[in-house]
Amino acid sequence: MAHAPFIIASYAIALGGVLGLLLVSYVSMRRAERQAEELRKGRRER
């Protein structure tokens, strides 16, 4: 029984999960940076 297809599939799933987590983290970071900038702008106007 060849194990290579299962090993390759597990690596592909793990890589996909890492890339998905990277994308979600990046989007979350950008959203938080935008909100922080809006807060800074609001405090300058007062």
Image (tube, rainbow, N blue to C red):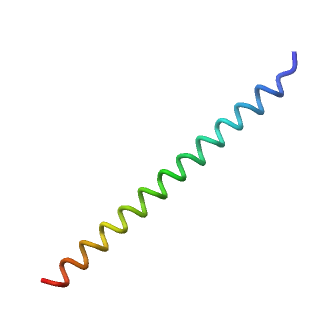
Q: Is residue 27 above or below residue 3?
A: below
Query: Residue 37: x percent and y percent?
Result: 31, 74
Q: Quadrant of residue 6?
A: top right
Q: Quadrant of the C terminus?
A: bottom left
Q: Looking at this view, is 20 or 1 the one in front?
A: 20
Q: Is residue 39 above or below residue 23?
A: below
The residue sitting at 25% across, 77% down in the picture is 40
The residue sitting at 18% across, 79% down in the picture is 43
Q: Is residue 18 above or below residue 32?
A: above
The residue sitting at 52% across, 47% down in the picture is 21
Q: Quadrant of the N terminus?
A: top right
Instruction: Name the outermost residue toward the left.
Output: 46
Q: Is residue 31 left or right of residue 24?
A: left
The residue sitting at 35% across, 62% down in the picture is 32
Query: Residue 38: x percent and y percent?
Result: 27, 73
Q: Is residue 24 left or right of residue 40?
A: right
Query: Residue 2: x percent and y percent?
Result: 87, 20
Query: Residue 27: x percent and y percent?
Result: 46, 57
Q: Is residue 28 above or below residue 6?
A: below
